[in-house]
Amino acid sequence: MSEMKFFVGGNWKMNGDKKSLGELIQTMNAGKVDPNVEVVCGAPSIYLDFARSKLDAKFGVAAQNCYKVAKGAFTGEISPAMIKDCGVNWVILGHSERRHVFGESDELIGQKTAHALENGLGVIACIGEKLDEREGGITEKVVFAQTKVIADNVKDWSKVVLAYEPVWAIGTGKTATPQQAQEVHEKLREWLKTNVSEAVANSVRIIYGGSVTGGTCKELASQKDVDGFLVGGASLKPEFIDIINAKA
């Protein structure tokens, strides 16, 4: 990958129904989007089939989570094999809501990452600090520890996108300043250079998440180490098209 492709993920979370998502998909399919951007929509698992069948082929689809084995007695879980069977090629893992609302550990997220990659899914791996951690001055320590567990479970980095999402900026309307985002992204790239390799550090996309909107996206996108976005609420609105085109 000589020229890194800007990556925009939309995380629909637990939102939408067939009617509203169908309308959103029509808007996306009809929208003028920058062809140099990779776009992936994270749909609720019950709508993965629906989203994949309706979305134009130029858009990818992601599951919002998966389990660490292919099948078995794990009521309520879905596996990478099932995700792939629906024609879906991505999964979001380690989102702060999975970590902090549902209590998923670093170790579990690492195991899920390894299993998803072994089964040919691309992984959007999420990391980020909480407000008390930022205020306590341990942002780096927290995100490096989270990144290490992911890195320990990755063999092929070409299928991994790293999403930095400061937890205090998710759904709060507080966005990290472009400078705050750039600072952490730059440190993450340095960490990858030191702990993985220079080639991986230079090719892996580090995307920013946390109240990204049509209004904030352009300045964020102009930062040297911001290679895309993971968008929450705004990914359910027509302004998602503007965010996709932030670099255009």
Image: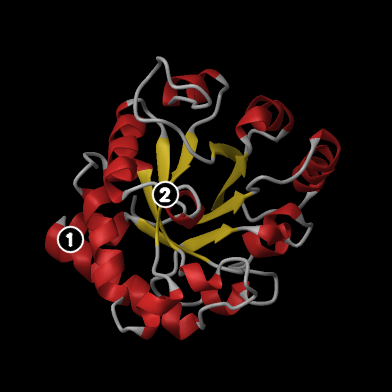
Is 118 above or below relative to 242?
above
Q: Image check: 97 left or right of 72? A: right
**Looking at numbered disc 1 in the image, what kind of residue is underneath it?**
Glu
Q: CA distance from mark 2 to mark 1?
A: 33 Å
Label 1: state its secondary structure.
helix
Q: Earlier in the sequence, mark 2 or mark 1?
A: 2
Query: Which residue shows up at 27% across the image and 57% down it?
Result: 147
**Looking at numbered disc 2 in the image, what kind of residue is underneath it?**
Gly
Residue 36 shows up from this direction: no
Residue 168 shows up from this direction: yes
Q: Which residue is mark 1?
A: 198
Query: Which residue shows up at 38% across the image and 19% down it?
Result: 70
Disc 2 and disc 1 in contact, CB within 8 angstroms: no
Is 88 above or below relative to 170?
above
Residue 31 at x, y percent in the picture: 77, 51
Query: Which residue shows up at 47% across the image and 47% down it?
Result: 102
Q: Which residue is mark 2?
A: 103
Residue 244 at x, y percent in the picture: 63, 59
Mark 1 crowd level (few <14, some 14–19, many ≥20, 10 Å Cα): some
Mark 2 crowd level (few <14, some 14–19, many ≥20, 10 Å Cα): few
Front in this rendered view, residue 172 or 222 = 172
Which of label 2 and label 1 is nearer to you? 2
Front in this rendered view, residue 192 or 18 = 18
Query: Which residue shows up at 34% across the image and 23% down it?
Result: 69
Q: Which mark is residue 46?
A: none
Q: Residue furthest top?
A: 72
Q: Quadrant of the C terminus?
A: bottom right
Residue 134 at x, y percent in the picture: 38, 80
Label 2: state its secondary structure.
loop
